[in-house]
Image (cartoon, rainbow, N blue to C red):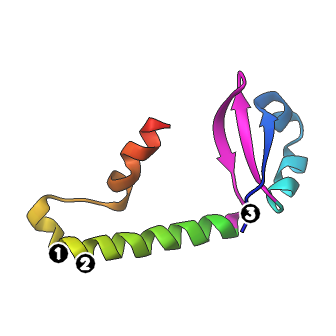
């Protein structure tokens, strides 16, 4: 599992995009804008694993909740949207 992060300013990431993409193979890359983290680049395979994990967690959530129509429509994006907005 990758635990290391590397930071690039937006200007550096734009200027060195090929290099940034190579680095994403070894570690996650944080792109900063005005010194504040704005985005994260991760390896595609890692992204797929994360999304598969979230799908499994969502399925477990549905098993626990029961019939989701009884609670209104809920989808995976809505479940995690408030966490994303807090960042």
> Disc 2, disc 3: CB below 8 Å?
no
Residue farthest to the top? 34
> Disc 1, disc 2: CB below 8 Å?
yes
**Circle on res. 63:** 2
The count of marks equals: 3
**Circle on res. 57:** none
Mark 3, other Cα within 10 Å: few <14 / some 14–19 / many ≥20: few
Q: Residue at x 33, y 55 (%)?
A: 79
Residue farthest to the front? 3
Which x, y percent locates residue 82? 37, 43
Q: Is residue 70 above or below residue 23?
A: below
> Is 70 left, or right, of 12 in this rendering?
left
Q: Residue at x 30, y 70 (%)?
A: 61
**Circle on res. 66:** 1
Mark 2–mark 3 Cα distance, whole angstroms, equals 31 Å
Which x, y percent locates residue 49? 59, 72
């Amino acid at each position: 599992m990758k635990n290391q992060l590397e930071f690039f300013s937006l200007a550096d990431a734009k200027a060195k995009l090929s290099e940034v993409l190579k680095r994403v193979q070894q570690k996650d890359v944080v792109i900063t804008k005005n010194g504040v983290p704005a985005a994260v680049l991760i390896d595609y395979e890692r992204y797929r694993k994360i999304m598969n994990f979230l799908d499994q967690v969502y399925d477990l959530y549905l098993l626990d909740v029961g019939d989701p129509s009884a609670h209104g429509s809920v989808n995976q994006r809505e479940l995690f949207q408030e966490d994303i907005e807090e960042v």
